[in-house]
Amino acid sequence: MKKLFLTIALFSLTLSYQTIIAEVIGKIPLGTNKSADNVIEVSFPDGWFSNKKKNPFDLQYFSQFEQITTGIFLYKKIDLSSKYTAKKLLEVHVNDLKSKREKFKILEAEKIIETDEKKLITVVYSGEKGVSRNYYKFSVVETKKPADAYLVILQTIIPSQWGKSKEVVENIVGSVQIK
């Protein structure tokens, strides 16, 4: 009985600690990080760490407790056929993940923001794989100067952290630059 009580107490303490961290993480200042080739520059909160293992992204970071991930693909326009627009790249990446998930449905409709320097398209989906359910925020950043490139950003968030971490993932996407 004591072991059961101790296990429940430790589990509750762990959940409380994770909730406190999630609430505070939005207030943590962002630090600048660069891709291995120094082409992509992006800011992540303190405690985030890069994925050192082989992965398909040009840059990938995990939150401290790995409840949020951000992966970035770089596409230089000069390397793509003219049919690949920002919307087409978004469609390709969404369809790829959709083919690998169950119950894949839109959570937040597509939004487009355009400035003199860049164009940003975002959309959020939910989906399931095995016993896990996640939210997937897709963002395509089209830069106009100096690189003339596209960045496709995939952020994976566990649903219980979405409300608390939404501002954090938006700040990450807003900080992305190509050098």
Image (tube, rainbow, N blue to C red):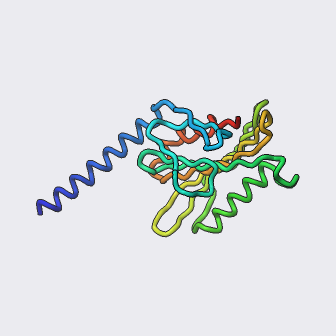
| Figure quadrant of the C terminus | top right
Q: Residue furthest front?
A: 37
Residue at the location (63% across, 37% down)? 41
Where residue 104 sits, quadrant-wise, is bottom right
Residue at the location (68% across, 58% down)? 94
In the image, residue 37 lies at what x, y percent? 65, 42
**Is residue 143 left or right of 175 when viewed as pictured?**
right
| Figure quadrant of the N terminus | bottom left
Q: Is residue 50 above or below residue 7?
A: above
In the image, residue 129 lies at what x, y percent? 52, 67
In the image, residue 35 lies at what x, y percent? 61, 42
Please say whether residue 108 is visible from this viewpoint. no
Residue at the location (73% across, 59% down)? 92
Q: Is residue 7 above or below residue 63?
A: below
Q: Is residue 149 above or below residue 56?
A: above
Residue at the location (55% across, 54% down)? 135
In the image, residue 32 lies at what x, y percent? 56, 33
**Is residue 4 left or right of 107 when viewed as pictured?**
left
Please say whether residue 41 is visible from this viewpoint. yes
Q: Residue furthest right?
A: 82
In-front residue for pair 53/41: 53
